[in-house]
């Protein structure tokens, strides 16, 4: 049997973004509606045993990268136990975590010991009042989590900043300087029309090509690369170790190189952020499917993966929120 997942368009699928919860302790306005409480019932969540089975099947089919996401993954109880189990699976070479870092100070050491080596942290502002406006949370908790992660030995630590017109666009240079100071990698992200919250956020859309041009006036930007399975296009700031990535799903989509699928907390495999193609694995798992049947289901799902998203052409197409899909 061919031990490599390849979709209809010849793209090797070797990266799974695994959501362990759709809940979050922040309320970023572009991700989750204010007052939202329609979360997946806990008995619908995949158990740790079920997650291990699914990721094990992906690994046997050639997947090498897994990123643990949410919602906020650290809301899920005993997460280091799960990551240790995933890190031990044959074939998994790269286990990483996306987090808002509010709880990272408490868990950084355990997560590193459990096999997580790379982390991405969402951080849209370095101003405490503005951060609270965007997220309803406290900036000092995030900064404490970042420093704890640095002390625990995570590398690289990537800062993800959604750049938004009229909200935080003026902080781009400050975030660059912050990352140079602390040895972090920086990625700028364009807003995406995911659900009503995302579509409202597109009022604040910023084309990152303009941000790159603006930075080039202050810094000497050289070609740069970073290891990882993600879509960012990188430059390096001359005279520093800083890499800056630009994630541009709208202005310069990267669908032709998309190598990933998303597994939601309820066991739904989503093939694309900007389309509704999906396959539900939880019913199969709870009906007692064999490993061979699980692998066949995963191959069937990959055959559903579309060629590209249609954020520009059909911005109203995706009704689910980002927290429902998984980061």
Image (tube, rainbow, N blue to C red):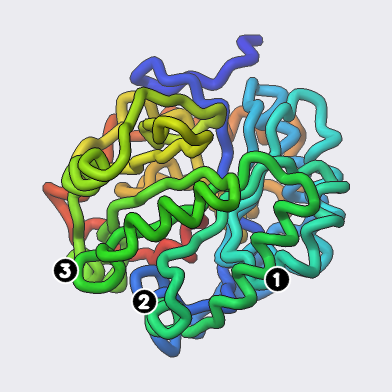
Which element type, helix, strand or loop, lies under badge 2? loop
Q: Which residue is drawn at 28% across and 58% down?
A: 191
Q: Are marks 2 and 3 in contact (CB under 8 Å)?
A: no
Residue closer to the observer: 87 or 136: 136
Q: Quadrant of residue 103?
A: bottom right
Tag in front: 2 or 1: 1
As drawn, is 276 to the left or to the right of 199?
right
Which element type, helix, strand or loop, lies under badge 3? helix
Residue closer to the observer: 78 or 41: 78
Q: Closer to the N terminus: mark 2 or mark 1?
A: 2
Q: Is residue 191 above or below residue 87?
A: below
Q: Closer to the N terminus: mark 3 or mark 1?
A: 1
Please tell me the numbered disc located at residue 34. none
Residue 265 image point, x, y percent: 61, 59
Residue that badge 3 annotates: 203
As drawn, is 309 to the left or to the right of 23?
left
Q: Residue furthest left?
A: 313
Q: Residue at x 48, y 63 (%)?
A: 123
| Res 149 seen here | yes
Residue that badge 2 annotates: 29
Please tell me the numbered disc located at residue 103. 1
Q: Residue at x 51, y 29 (%)?
A: 226
Q: Residue at x 39, y 15 (%)?
A: 10
């Amino acid at each position: 049997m061919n031990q490599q997942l390849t979709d209809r368009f010849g793209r090797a699928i070797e990266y799974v973004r695994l959501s362990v919860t759709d809940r979050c302790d922040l309320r970023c306005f572009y991700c989750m509606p204010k007052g939202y409480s329609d979360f997946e019932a806990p008995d619908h969540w995949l158990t740790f045993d079920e997650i291990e089975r699914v990721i094990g099947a992906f690994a046997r089919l050639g997947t090498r990268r897994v990123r643990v996401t949410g919602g906020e993954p650290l809301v899920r109880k005993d997460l280091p136990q799960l990551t240790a189990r995933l890190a031990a699976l044959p074939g998994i070479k790269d286990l990483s975590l996306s987090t808002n870092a509010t709880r990272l100070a408490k868990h950084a050491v355990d997560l590193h010991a459990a096999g997580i080596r790379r982390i991405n942290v969402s951080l849209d502002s370095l101003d405490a009042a503005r951060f609270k406006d965007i997220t309803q949370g406290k900036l000092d908790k995030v900064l404490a989590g970042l420093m704890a992660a640095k002390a625990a030995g995570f590398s690289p630590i990537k800062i993800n900043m959604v750049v938004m017109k009229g909200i935080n666009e003026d902080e781009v240079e400050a975030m660059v300087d912050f990352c140079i100071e602390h040895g972090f990698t920086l990625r700028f992200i364009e807003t995406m029309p995911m659900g009503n919250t995302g579509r409202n956020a597109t009022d604040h859309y910023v084309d990152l090509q303009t941000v790159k041009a603006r930075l080039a006036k202050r810094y000497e930007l050289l070609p740069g690369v970073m290891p990882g399975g993600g879509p960012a296009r990188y430059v390096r700031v001359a005279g520093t170790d800083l890499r800056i990535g630009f994630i541009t799903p709208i202005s310069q989509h990267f669908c032709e190189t998309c190598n990933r699928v998303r597994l939601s907390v309820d066991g739904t495999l989503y093939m694309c952020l900007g389309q509704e193609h999906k396959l539900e694995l939880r019913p199969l798992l709870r009906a007692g499917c064999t490993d061979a049947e699980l692998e066949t289901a995963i191959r069937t799902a990959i055959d559903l993966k579309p060629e590209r998203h249609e954020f520009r052409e059909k911005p109203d197409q995706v009704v689910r929120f980002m927290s429902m899909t998984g980061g």
